[in-house]
Amino acid sequence: MNHTPTMRELNECFIENARRSAVTPVRAIDRQPVIAASDRWVPSADKTTISKKFSFISTEKRNQFVFGMLAREEHYKHPTMKTVIDDNEVCVTLGTRDLQTVTELDRELASFCDVLHKELLYSHLDASRR
């Protein structure tokens, strides 16, 4: 007759196997500087522009962001950005000068900047998993 293990026996077996496991459950990776993503675009006092500051862990990542952002601006043919680069920080201001307002196209560019920043910010994590 087959013995059906009890919950206690199953639990004890699980604990014993976990103790014998030589595999580390979490693999340590090289520590990278922590950069917190800012989640909000800030409107100007007169509501004609929105701005956001992006921080990067390296000049290479900052440059990839700026080149990607400028390529998207060229693609949209909507040159309304004001970009200020200070070391590894980039402050982007969006707004349509002719209309003195933030248009849907400005919001699309803002979303693109957010996605690009997050991709660059977390790309070292993807590389370490390979």
Image (cartoon, rainbow, N blue to C red):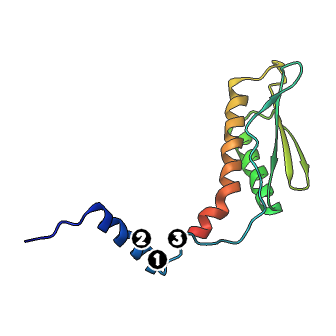
CB under 8 Å between callouts 2 and 1?
yes
Q: Is residue 10 left or right of residue 120?
A: left
Which residue is tagged 1? 19
Q: Is residue 13 left or right of residue 87?
A: left
| Residue name at image x 15 percent, y 70 percent | 3
Looking at the image, is mark 1 or mark 3 earlier in the sequence? 1
Q: Residues within 10 Å of mark 2 (few under 14, many from 20)?
A: few
> Residue 34, image x and y in percent?
77, 58
> Residue 12, image x and y in percent?
36, 70
> Residue 115, image x and y in percent?
66, 45
Q: Is residue 81 visible?
A: no
**Residue sticking out furthest to the left:** 1
Check the image and report above or below for 63 versus 48. Answer: below
> Residue 19, image x and y in percent?
46, 77
Check the image and report above or below for 14 versus 102. Answer: below
Q: Residues within 10 Å of mark 1 (few under 14, many from 20)?
A: few
What kind of residue is marked 2? Ile
What kind of residue is marked 3? Pro
SS at circle 1: helix
Which residue is tagged 2? 15
Distance of mark 2 from mark 3, alpha carbons?
14 Å
Judging depth in this view, the residue of 25 and 115 nearest the camera is 25
Which residue is tagged 3? 25
Looking at the image, is mark 2 or mark 3 earlier in the sequence? 2
What kind of residue is marked 1? Arg
Q: Residues within 10 Å of mark 3 (few under 14, many from 20)?
A: few
